[in-house]
Amino acid sequence: MVAICSKCHQTISTSRVGVRLTLLKARIFDAIKAAGDLGISSPELHHEIYRGYGRERSSNMMRIHIGQINDMLQSTDWRIVADPPSGGFARWYLQRLRREAAE
């Protein structure tokens, strides 16, 4: 699933909210963003991202990818959050953080 440039042989990436993401992580971000206020469940997200890629992937991998995306989003006002925050089948949302004004 990793795309490689045929000329320079580097991993092709793309940008979301000012952060460079791999194509897989960009697809995850886009699916969560497209879900809007309803969010997207873990099984729905897993199906959306991995359909057509043959072998099954661990459902826990999605949580790992989202954690990595959130690490990359640290310099932005955006986070991917889950409801409920742990266990069960979470629903994922893109949330804009409120920044406190400097005093």
Image (cartoon, rainbow, N blue to C red):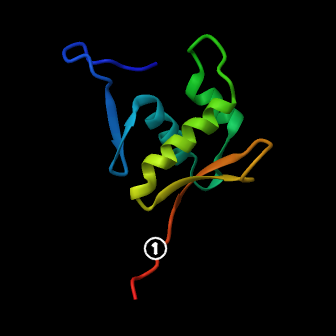
- The residue lying at 31 percent from left, 26 percent from top is 12
| Figure quadrant of residue 77 | bottom left
Q: Nearer the viewer, residue 100 or 50?
A: 100
Amino acid at the residue labelled 1: Arg
| Figure quadrant of residue 44 | top right
Where residue 22 appears, as percent x and y from the top left, is: 40, 32
- The residue lying at 76 percent from left, 41 percent from top is 89
In this rendering, is residue 93 above or below 28? below
- 45 on left or right of 98: right
| Figure quadrant of residue 49 | top right
Where residue 71 appears, as percent x and y from the top left, is: 48, 48
Where residue 68 appears, as percent x and y from the top left, is: 51, 41
Residue lying at the far left in this picture: please name it: 7
Pointer 1: what residue? 99
In this rendering, is residue 81 above or below 24? below
- The residue lying at 33 percent from left, 36 percent from top is 14
Residue lying at the far bottom in this picture: please name it: 103
